[in-house]
Image (cartoon, rainbow, N blue to C red):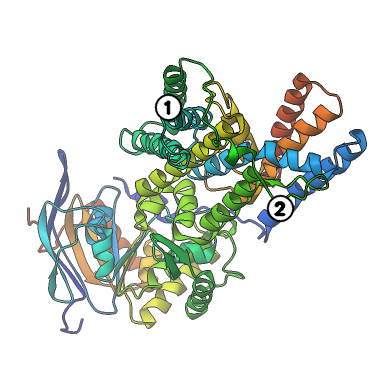
Amino acid sequence: MSMTKVEKMVEDAPHARRKIPNLNSSALDRIITFGAVVVLFIFFSFTAPNFFTIRSVLSLALQTSAVTMMGIGVTFAIITGGIDLSIGSVVALSGTIAVMVARTGVPIWLSMIIGLLVGVVAGLLNALMITKLKLPPFIATLGMMMVARGVALTITNANAWPAPEGFGDLGNGTIFGTGQKFPGIPYPVIIMVAVALIFSFFLGKTRTGRYTYAVGSNEEAARLAGIKVNQVKIIVYILSGFLAALVGVILASRMVTSQPNSAISYEMNAIAAAVIGGSSLMGGVGTVLGTVIGSFIIGILTVGLTMSGANYFMQQIVIGLVLIASVTVDQLRNRK
Amino acid sequence: MAETTPIVEMRNIKKNFAAVRALRGVDLVLHQNEVLGLVGDNAAGKSTLMKVLSGACIPDEGEIFVDGKKANISDPLSARHLGIEMVYQDLALINHLDVAANVFLGRETMSSQLGVIGVMNQRHMEEETRRLLDRLKIDISSVRLDVERLSGGQRQAVAIARTTAFNAKVIIMDEPTAALSVAAISQVLDLVRELKAQGCSIIVISHRLEDIYQVSDRIIVLRHGHKVCDCPISGDIHEFRERVVAYIVGARDDFSQAAVD
């Protein structure tokens, strides 16, 4: 331990970096993404004559509801710095279990609740693998993705079994309809709006919501502040599993059959929606509203391109490019 | 020092990490409303000693008294309940949350409780944070700024302010002036003086002897897990510095209490 070394340390005081304060940057982000939705709407209104009608807007909302709700769930996981790849398979598993249980004569409402519990259990298992076995979320939920899909295929023998009468009400019913003039708002759309409002409030206004950001932004600091990090992660993955199961039950109800092969790669669309909506896979960043907007951008592109006559392959190319572009813009903005 | 009950007294603290004897029986006294500088070379045991006091590390042996009463500090929470707060070297701030959220992190004020779900009273937390920053004369334009947008000095100020938001009696600062600009260092030192003026007792760990000299009343030097010097700040800066460095590097070893182990 030489004198000079100590002296050097004593003198060592690198200059702090300085940043120009930039208020409301997240608000600006949201205005930009929301603006993109409006631009897309206007664009497709010209290219596809029937695009801007109540009927097609409602059908757009209905089609988008699944990915939106899954996206909201996975947004929580992404904010903690994790990921949930199992949600697509959990959709299939919870839906098929709800149908199979209903087929045994259990009341429909109860079989649907059992379907939701399947999602909660899958989420809990994900969380325990991540918090107790210390598996990376990517691996834990990748494993769950395969297991859940496999179980769904096994219990149905890969068949689409018809559900009993009345099972389809949730997915196919509408409210506020006035016959020919206005077909009514589908239940899944109402549920989607409720889910978005509830979880937006949960993430933004509650203590657990704030801890979700804290865990993803600086896990060690969160722990030092007395936050129960594992508890937050468990809540987040249960939430993600629950919302996937909700989508699963709704989709099964819409089909009125068990669909063990449904929602394949939906998790990727949900993650894309979250990322287009401003979530960062590095953790600490993301909002429910952003994900909803991101999901609608994907939905509008899909429906709009279809109605404009572009084929499915074209849609994939466009959505992929939009995903890459949106993250690139984010990176460029953060760099300065 | 006046003969009052010390706010903190640590007696014969020992801590081993496997074969490494980090602390070999260290005594430390912190008096009421005193600023104590704690120095030593790397691995001298200063951070470990402070982790023991803040509950982040459990000693193998030794006793701690807070306000004259024997204290059982088993985790950071129990230390906090005793009014002992630590400002960590790596700041322990949440970059993606704003100033108010960071100040109240882990201790959010609730406006209502929906079952197990606590709804935060953000307005109250923002107002309290504003008041706190003003009281400590910390210059930050808005409590809604994300912490990642603050300068190094402002970040350190937030980290320190956070400990005082809940009436900490003892504040431990681990290298509060490391990696700061000259202007930011003087801000932080002003903040230490301000906290002392408001009645806090403070322990400052630092490699920067000038900073210790400027704000401290007394200095303790650790070397290889022993206390090798415990004396009031005195003399001019050059003499002080020469003396302390001699203890740090072991060139001087005339402190009577040194050989406890």
Residue under label 2: A176
Q: Could you tell me residue A206's position as x and y percent?
A: 48, 60
Three-letter code, disc 1? Met
First in sequence: mark 1 or mark 2? 1
Q: For the image shown, how many numbered marks are present on the structure?
A: 2
For mark 2, name the chain. A
Which quarter of the figure is the N terminus of chain B placed in? bottom left
Which residue is painted at 19% across and 49% down in the image? B224
Q: Could you tell me residue B220's position as x and y percent?
A: 24, 64
Which of the pair B245/A71 is nearer the observer?
A71
Q: Is residue B127 visible?
A: yes
Describe residue B116's horizontal placement relative to residue A13 as left or right: left
Among the 4 quarters of the image, the one containing residue A110? top left
Q: Is residue A15 visible?
A: no
Which residue is painted at 74% across and 39% down in the image? A60
Describe residue A273's horizontal placement relative to residue B199 as left or right: right
Q: Are marks 1 and 2 in contact (CB under 8 Å)?
A: no
Residue under label 1: A144
Query: Mark 1: which secondary structure?
Result: helix
Among the 4 quarters of the image, the one containing residue B79? bottom left
Which of the pair A49/A281 is nearer the observer?
A49
Q: Could you tell me residue B196's position as x and y percent?
A: 36, 78
Q: Are marks 1 and 2 on the same chain?
A: yes
Residue A77 is tagged as none
Q: Is residue B35 above or below residue A198?
A: below
